[in-house]
Image (cartoon, grey):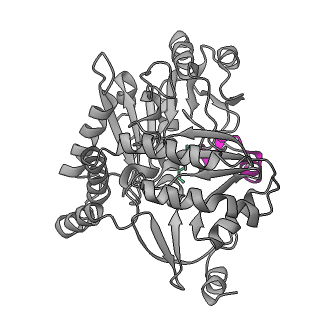
Amino acid sequence: MNTWTQRYGDALMNTFGPPKMVLARGKGARVWDVDGREYLDLLGGIAVNSLGHAHPRLVAAVTEQLQTLGHISNFFASVPQIELAERLNMLLNLGVTERVETHSFFTNSGAEANEAALKLTRRTGRTRIVATEGSFHGRTMGALAITAKAAYREPFEPLPGDVTFVPFGDADALAAAVDDRCAAVVVEPVQGEAGVEIPPHDYLSAARSITHRHGALLWLDEVQTGIGRTGSWFAHQNTALVDAPVVPDVITLAKGLAGGIPIGVCLATGGAGKLFDPGNHGTTFGGNPVAAAAALAVLDTIVEDDLLEHVATVGELLASGVAADSRVTGVRAAGLLIGLDLVEAKAADVVSAAQDAGFIVNACRPDRIRLAPPLVLTAADVAEFVDAWPGILDEAGVTR
Ligand SMILES: *Cc1c(COP(=O)(O)O)cnc(C)c1O
């Protein structure tokens, strides 16, 4: 065992199991471990490092902001925070015919964004939440209450109650579960942690009409799918995934928004954006100038470098490249969020073999690999991985 791994085990809580390796630095879509070995990072800190590692634009924005004004608390406002909330409003209004008013509450993570949203739904005067099987919304108590996975929930019960789970992607099941007591339906446009599960194209529009019918909020958790990941600013605007863009009442974002600087946001439209009164919710760090400046740098770079189009192109290249091996029995691709079904439940072996070959990938299920690389992944990076892929499967012992 290397000494860093040993020291990790002695000093940190054992929540994640032993780390796969100890990393020292990164540049673009590459990282290097403490022994100087190079890896192509096809996980991007779990869909977080939108601009890759050490992007000059992000480094400059964070450095400049920290040198100017780093933290102030929410007794005060800062220019980057206000500008970021306005920019998110602008992005939400793309492709929408009637202008939508939005209000933002900034947090430091996806779970916290969902906690804020969950509290917001209570302000409707209703308590019942309809969530989906396979969902992942975070590990804090409220976020866990709407997360389906039994292994995550059960050690911590009782959780905040009044949550009903329905099969994901099934509009009839949703229609049957939602009633006039329902505060909100919460759903991921594409389930990320469940292994890149893509629902039927009319699912979100069905969810929108069902929630409208019962006066319930439609809350989309775009923590993993938002900010360019699928090739659109939001997955719910992506016509490759949905039959028609919907206007949700609540959207939660985090992961890729600030490219690796911790941030989250609970973004609400129309009347939902005004449900909180002063004193209803709060945060010390949330919306701090550094995180907001980082997010603005990410959004600017996505625009200036045409990354949405790039994600769609490179995502297709990557998905079709790895699908060419017959041991991949299914591909679930939403831009640069890709799930690969393997002919055998050997995903953990594939992760190890990939690491030995200099690539970072993720096993989201025993029989499925997830790729969520930086949005700046190049066609040359893709070619390198696609060339190595059959050898990785051989090495992992996946039978032909
Ligand atoms: C990762 C994730 C979360 C939790 O975000 P954290 O920042 O880890 O708290 C919530 N929802 C979805 C869809 C996620 O992928």
Question: Residue 243 appears at what percent x and percent y?
Answer: 50, 19
Is residue 31 found left or right of 347 in the rendered image?
left
Q: Is residue 142 magenta?
A: yes
Q: Give the residue displayed 47% in from the left and 40% down from the top.
A: 230
Side of 371 relative to 272 (left or right): right
Q: Is residue 377 visible?
A: no
Q: Nearer the viewer, residue 230 or 223?
A: 230
Magenta portion: prevailing SS class = helix
Q: Quadrant of residue 166?
A: top right
Quarter of the figure with the N terminus: bottom right
Which residue is at 68% across, 44% downward?
A: 159
Classify residue 344 as left or right of residue 199: right
Say which residue appears at 34% left-offset and 38% top-offset: 104
Q: Nearer the viewer, residue 298 or 118?
A: 298
In the image, the segment drawn in magenta is 139-156
Q: Is residue 64 above or below residue 169?
A: below
Considering depth in this image, is 19 or 162 the residue closer to the camera?
19
